Amino acid sequence: MSSANLHSFVVPIITRVLTNLRAVTEKGAAHAEAKKIDPASLINFRLYPDMLPFSSQIQIATDASKGCLARLAGIDAPRFEDTEKTFGELFARIEKTLAFVGSVKPEQTEGAEQRAIVIKTPSAELNFTGLTYVQGFVIPNLLFHATTAYNILRHNGVEIGKMDFLGRP
């Protein structure tokens, strides 16, 4: 896969997942308003005590997305403080991420499929090429957190279904 193809492969996936994540989040906000539920109860909800809350799912999905394009382009990703406490702040985070992802041009990722990508975590150092990073780390990570956010909302009675997650072609 060439770098132009890598860019054209990953950007539409990230854009679609984040756009659909925003849409289900909007439905969560509307649900809270209609049912007179404190929005913070949804934003802070966890499926299990040792899991991260809804807000963190959005934060990690957006971090994975902006980090992906930044690493592929060899540039710094914008830094977000992870302080979102309202639906409006979560919407803004998604929009800022989509704007950044959209600003990275295919030529900036030239050669990225073979570029060494190193992710340092507290417990390990993960080594990838650009291609294996996108295929084996970014996309699964993004989908995991988008799915968990969806599941938190669905668990709390938000009327969303599979097509809300997948979006309309």
Image (tube, rainbow, N blue to C red):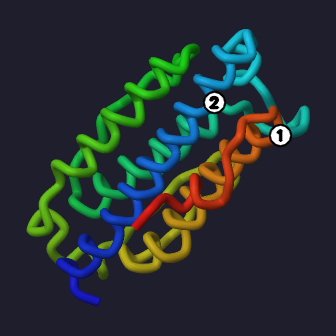
Q: Residue at x 73, y 31 (%)?
A: 53
Q: Residue at x 21, y 60 (%)?
A: 73
Tell me the crowding category of disc 1: few under 14, some 14 to 19, or many 20 or more residues within 10 angstroms, Cα based: few
Tell me the crowding category of disc 2: few under 14, some 14 to 19, or many 20 or more residues within 10 angstroms, Cα based: many
Along the horizontal axis of the image, is 157 left or right of 114? right
Please tell me which residue lies in front, 137 or 62: 62
Image coordinates for residue 130, horizontal then vertical, percent: 36, 73
Q: Secondary structure at mark 2?
A: helix
Residue under label 2: 28
Q: Is residue 63 above or below residue 140?
A: above
Looking at the image, which residue sits at the far left? 107
Q: Earlier in the sequence, mark 1 or mark 2?
A: 2
Q: Is residue 55 above or below residue 19?
A: above
Question: What's under tag 1, amino acid-wise?
Answer: His
Q: Secondary structure at mark 1?
A: helix
Q: Is residue 54 above or below residue 20?
A: above
Image coordinates for residue 30, horizontal then vertical, percent: 59, 24
Residue under label 1: 155
Along the horizontal axis of the image, is 9 left or right of 54? left
Q: Residue at x 90, y 32 (%)?
A: 49
Q: Are marks 1 and 2 in contact (CB under 8 Å)?
A: no
